[in-house]
Image (cartoon, rainbow, N blue to C red):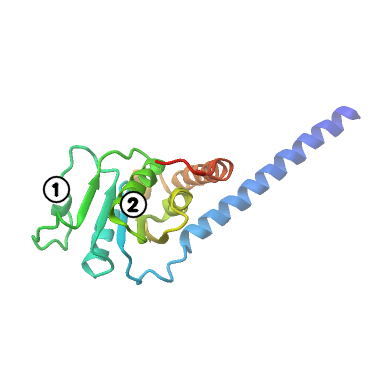
Amino acid sequence: MKRRVAVLGIIMIALTSFAIWGIGFITFCDLVKNTDTARQLMKTDAIVILTGGSDRINAGLDMMKTGMSEQVFISGVNEKVTLKEILSLWPEYDGSDLRCCITLDYAAQDTKDNAVEALKWVRARHVQSFRLVTSDYHIMRALMEFTRLMPEKGIFPSPVTSTPAEYAAKGGYMKLMIGEYHKTVLTWLRVTLDPPGKRIY
């Protein structure tokens, strides 16, 4: 009898855990599709673009061209890639000299690094508000990292809608979303349990 109760208890715990995971995953997917972009047309001091998705850089540069900001920071650039090469892949590029307006960060290796390197640049440029450009599935985790280090700044999420080709390149929609969901949960736990306090980056 005791053994049966124990087995039933384990089953109930497993089912409850799966239900909580499932509700959390569904909520995450819904939030990805419905990130608040109400102030997306608002002009900011800068645009911060995180590399990784196929259309992120072009989307951010398009925003600059339409007048949303005159300063752009692209974080996580491969050390072998130059600004000239980046601009050559931007359909809207008209040949203008944009070295004064675009800063490339070669140091960041992950989302946490993106936030740290952006913080240094934001402080140096006295930026008070910026648009954060990254893929839709990545925006929540990125916001956590950036808000953790810069809670006083105006950070406006500008998610780039992922394409079927991008999902396919990353193993399919479900694989990508489940992996990103787990990363987001772990990031939330770390950010909650380890606030930056007065540490200087």
Q: Where is the N terminus found, in terms of image quarters?
A: top right
Q: Which amino acid type is shown beneath numbered disc 1?
A: Glu
Helix, strand or loop status at disc 1: helix
Q: Residue shown at 35%/61% (left/top)?
A: 131
Q: Earlier in the sequence, mark 2 or mark 1?
A: 1
The percent position of residue 156, horizontal first and vertical second, equals 40, 62
The mark tally for this picture is 2
Quarter of the image where one finds residue 12: top right
Q: Which amino acid type is shown beneath numbered disc 2?
A: Arg
Q: Where is the C terminus found, in terms of image quarters?
A: top left
Q: Residue shown at 24%/57% (left/top)?
A: 58
Helix, strand or loop status at disc 2: helix
Q: Residues within 10 Å of mark 1 (few under 14, many from 20)?
A: few
Residue 200 visible (yes or no)? yes
Quarter of the image where one finds residue 160: bottom left
Q: Which residue is mark 2?
A: 123
The percent position of residue 142, horizontal first and vertical second, equals 43, 50
Instruction: Report the front residue among 5 and 86.
Output: 86
Instruction: Report the front residue among 126 and 192.
Output: 126
Q: Which residue is mark 1?
A: 85
Q: Residue shown at 16%/60% (left/top)?
A: 91
The percent position of residue 121, horizontal first and vertical second, equals 30, 49
Furthest-top residue in view? Answer: 3
Q: Disc 2 vs disc 1: Cβ atoms closer than 8 Å?
A: no
Instruction: Report the front residue among 198 and 74.
Output: 198
| Residue 89 relative to residue 126: left or right | left
Q: Residues within 10 Å of mark 2 (few under 14, many from 20)?
A: few
The percent position of residue 3, horizontal first and vertical second, equals 86, 27
Residue 55 visible (yes or no)? no
